[in-house]
Amino acid sequence: MKPSHSERDNLLEEAPQGLYDTIKMEERRVLPKVPVPPLKQTLDTYLKCVQHLVKEEQFKKTKAIVERFGAPGGVGEVLQKKLLERRDKMTNWVYDYWLEDMYLNNRLALPVNSSPAMVFPKQMFKDHRDALRFAARLIRGVLDYKALVDARALPVDFARGQLAGTPLCMEQYYHLFTSYRYPGLKTDTLKVQMNAASSAPEHIIVACKNQFFVLDVVANSKQLNELEIVSQLEKILKMSENAEERLPPFGILTSDGRTEWAQAREALTKDQTNRGSLALIESCICVVCLDEPSGLQPSDNNRALLMLHGGGREKNGANRWYDKSMQFVVGMDGICGVVCEHSPFEGIVLVQCSEHLMKYITGSPSKIVRASSIRELPPPRRLLWKYNPHIQGLLEASRERLKRLVNNLDMDVFKFKAYGKEFIKNQKMSPDAFIQVALQLAFYKCNKRLVSTYESASIRRFQDGRVDNIRSATLEALAFVQSMTDERAAFTAITGMAIDNHLLGLLRIAKELNMEKPEIFCDETYLASNHFILSTSQVPTTVEMFCCYGPVVPNGYGVCYNPQSDHIIFCVSSFWENTKTSSAVFVKALKEGLLEIWDLCNRSSAAATKVADSSQEASQPHKSGK
Ligand code: COA
């Protein structure tokens, strides 16, 4: 439902600044700016969020620090005032702060630690030509979707659930094919090309046997058709098989830590040829990786692992370029999906795009293109690299670090089949809150405590809104899981308040003012509350596919869940190197917990029915007496 004009006027805020085109202005204007919550509200919520997660003594200390920070005339007020000024001046006061804090300043390697993957249904390719046809169809689907994005013709998304009907910011869609994350020595840079359509990139990079090829998707001002793309991909496959021309696996450098990759990139760019190759990769629409058969069973676990890290150098780990936002994988063995660089957009946008592509691929068969309509096209170009022993050493070091990452990832894809979101809705409960409580219960069963938990909550109903954090390890959740494990009764729902962006904003303002770091941000509690042992996210799909990602801390779990009407898919990840975590143990506890909550719901419904029946019986004479 679109908002009426009067609703739009109510939502209208000050026109955004910057180089936005008219359509974008129009879209943004209907959305409010991200608010800055009152200082007291955030500080009170912060204390409420952490009280049960830290020791009593520590909490006393934290409380005193927070009170000093929030006192009238204190540091908090000064920072809050500046933050409100920033909000007035900018389209979105938190966007840059958040982007740097969440992604660009993070020095960890992109695979596993940052880039989520979407696993497509296993394909049954008869031969390599079949796989190339799939890849060509996928590329046509990308061009089709990109045309919609470029024309700003995607229908505006609207919120569902409680805020049904609220329009959502579409900005993230415009970053899908235009973004590139450059590695930096201290911090990365996310560049989004918002060029005029005339100078938009018209090539895709195809990775095959660790070689990179430029595939122009436009020839003589006309896009390639599906058969032409198949024919170009055939040429790529052939060129990649030529052992004499084969170059070292340069893509592996992008799988390394960001500082290491930045250093390697500096070494590469000393050479003109390398600069040219990098420029072509950095300006492409997307990367398509034609993977060798992995030799692994196509189980959900293996497919998730292969999407997240490619299986290391021995498999397809170097057949990647992780800086590019959209990287499609087409395995000759039918293992397919997409791995994305996360900083330009959220999983929900990735889902929308992936679903469009899957529908495009499986939809009506492509128009029969007559053989004569295949144009004689120049072959795709292989990207060339110049290297020396120093660069070869860097490739070797990246290979070793990727190997460790690959060996470390413990992934468990679990399909819970006993019930799905319909059962939960019938209990008059929010499926998301229900699943979050089940995750808290699983963690509590394994560790006898709760920990700081991240749950991404979309704030796309604001201009340029990305996400904030629902801290789902609430006091109420603790009471519930204790009652479940102690077999005492009571069930309270979880609630969450977004305080993370606000606290980050205050911290960054203090830095900008060159102030000494306020003690609230040096406090052990603050550090612990930002160490997300449980990192969770709901990524629902309407087409058969699932999303997965790795943990964000060495001793943590990454849990991505996809609620369907009669089942729920969970992708639980952790690191083997940490002896305290185990994805299989967590999944076992999760399954047990979900069944126990189910049992509790059934028992309380049965009890409610009994009460209703007996009260009906009791009221019968009265009723009939009327
Ligand atoms: N009784 C009955 N039904 C209920 C209910 C209740 N008490 N509470 C909610 N429901 C219904 C809703 O109306 C909704 O119905 P619909 O499927 O017909 O639309 C459905 O249950 C789902 O609602 P719920 O589970 O409460 O959550 P949600 O879908 O609103 O999602 C968040 C909650 C936090 C996950 C969501 O707001 C969000 O932010 N999603 C984005 C997360 C994200 O960014 N992920 C990617 C990160 S990379």
Image (spheres, grey):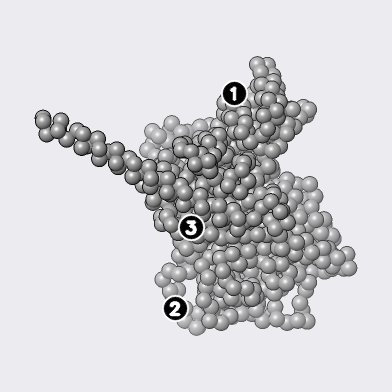
How many other residues sit within 10 Å of disc 2, few (<14), some (14-19) or many (≥20)?
Answer: few
Q: In this view, does 195 lie above or below 364?
A: above
Q: Disc 1 or 3, which lies upstream in sequence?
A: 1
Q: In this view, does 602 lie above or below 146?
A: above
Position in image of residue 214 (x %, y %) = 67, 69
Do labels 2 and 1 touch, CB within 8 Å? no
**Which amino acid lies under the numbered mark 3 shown in the image of this protein?**
Phe
Callout 3: few (<14), some (14-19), or many (20+) C-alpha neighbours within 10 Å? some
The answer to whether residue 281 is above or below residue 375 is above
**Closer to us: 413 or 225:** 413
Can you tell which of label 2 and label 3 is closer to the viewer?
Answer: 3
Residue 437, how many percent across, how many down?
A: 51, 44
The residue singled out by tag 1 in the image is: 40
Apparent side of residue 460 relative to residue 239 in the rendered image (left or right): left
User: Disc 2 designates what residue?
Assistant: 368
- Say left or right for 623 vs 405: left
